[in-house]
Image (tube, rainbow, N blue to C red):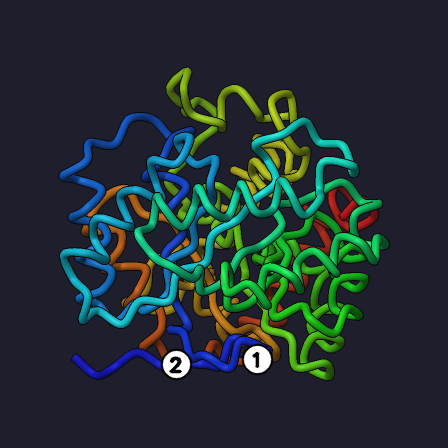
Amino acid sequence: MDPMEQRVLGRTGREVSVVGLGTWQLGADWGEVREEDALAVLDAAVASGVTFFDTADVYGDGRSEQLIGRYLRERPDAGIFTATKMGRRAEQLPEHYNLDNFRAWTDRSRANLGVDTLDLVQLHCPPTPVYSSDAVFDALDTLVAEKRVAAYAVSVETCEEALAAIARPGTASVQIILNPFRLKPLERVLPAAAEAGVGIIARVPLASGLLSGRYTRDTVFSADDHRTYNRHGEAFDQGETFSGVDFATGVEAAAEFAGLAPEGATPAQTALRWIIQQPGVTSVIPGARSPEQARANAEAAALPPLPRPTLDAVRELYDRRIRAQVHSRW
């Protein structure tokens, strides 16, 4: 297998694979995943060329971090860059984003992952006022000085939050929802990040599975799956589940999108390929619940670039079916 393309993750100066692995699924909120199955997913991703894992301290209350930590101990030669997130262990009030909490949260993540210094810690979609707080970013700089973290970043909900974070000189990267059903970041966020040397991590790349083309209006998800209990933002942020697209609308649009997949590629791989070739994107982080899914996701990196007619068709589909629901909000 040819090595997967690597790109520099913004101000970290470190290279990561263009297809990474999101590990929310391995912790919780997508239904139960056994430990041996989770480790098999990590192994399949690495065997397929993935060098970038993304996790968070709240995924399974630390279970995702712990599983990655076990894998890193067993495979110290794998060369994995691991990004985690912090902030969602407390009530979402700006005053909770302070140095004492940052130290406690990163110490817990360091223990879970079994490392002295975290490769990257990201604020986990914090309240909007946090982005304008000098004290918050001074505290993050302190974490770097104390070698608790090598670099810091943000995971955001809106384009305006992304632009505020990019303007901070210490921000290494921005994680933002980007997929064929969420095009707004292409307008200002990606150009601004590229100009500033800030990396872009594309999350929710398959719109919570919609872009796989596997769902119908009658699809039922398990009770412990966020696609059941957070469909409209009831449990956490609006705009996360299904990228903020109404499920019925999303299913119909996804069926159209599936028709754009080139021969030999699945709709999911087509969506990932579309993201990879957007100027300014560093890595895309699809999740996987099986080794087969992890391998299929990684294979998207080897697909040829989508041609201009396909890119134009994605834009037309978005403008016609999706834009009115999501563009003004996020």
Q: Amino acid at mark 2?
A: Gln
Disc ID at residue 6: 2
The residue shown at (41%, 15%) is 223
Residue 31 is left or right of residue 2, and the answer is: right
**The quadrant where residue 43 appears:** bottom left
Instruction: Work out which residue is located at the far top of the displayed protein and give it.
Output: 223
Q: Residue at label 1?
A: 308
Q: Please tell me which residue lies in front, 14 or 262.
A: 14
**How far is disc 1 from disc 2 in space, using C-alphas?**
24 Å
Crowdedness near tag 2: few (<14), some (14–19) or many (≥20) residues, C-alpha within 10 Å: some
**Residue ID at (21%, 83%):** 2
Q: x, y (%) of residue 30?
A: 38, 31
Q: Give me the residue at 64% from left, 21% from top.
A: 234
Residue 81 rendering spot, x and y as whole percentages: 37, 67
Question: Residue 257's spot in the image, x, y percent?
Answer: 50, 54
| Residue 192 image-quadrant placement | bottom right
Q: Residue at x 50, y 65 (%)?
A: 147
In this rendering, the answer to whether 232 lies above or below 99 is above
- Please tell me whether mark 2 sits on a helix, a strand or a loop: strand
Of residues 280 and 296, the one drawn nearer to the viewer in this rendering = 280
Front disc: 1 or 2: 2
Q: Nearer the viewer, residue 4 or 217?
A: 4
**On residue 47, which mark appears?**
none
Label 1 SS: helix
Q: Vertical placement of 174 versus 291: above or below?
A: below
**In the displayed structure image, the side of residue 76 where residue 23 appears, left or right:** right
Taking the image as shown, residue 193 lies to the left or right of residue 6, namely: right
Q: Position of residue 78 (x, y in %)?
A: 21, 69
The three-letter code of the residue at mark 1 reads Arg
Quarter of the image that includes the N terminus: bottom left
Q: Is residue 202 visible?
A: yes
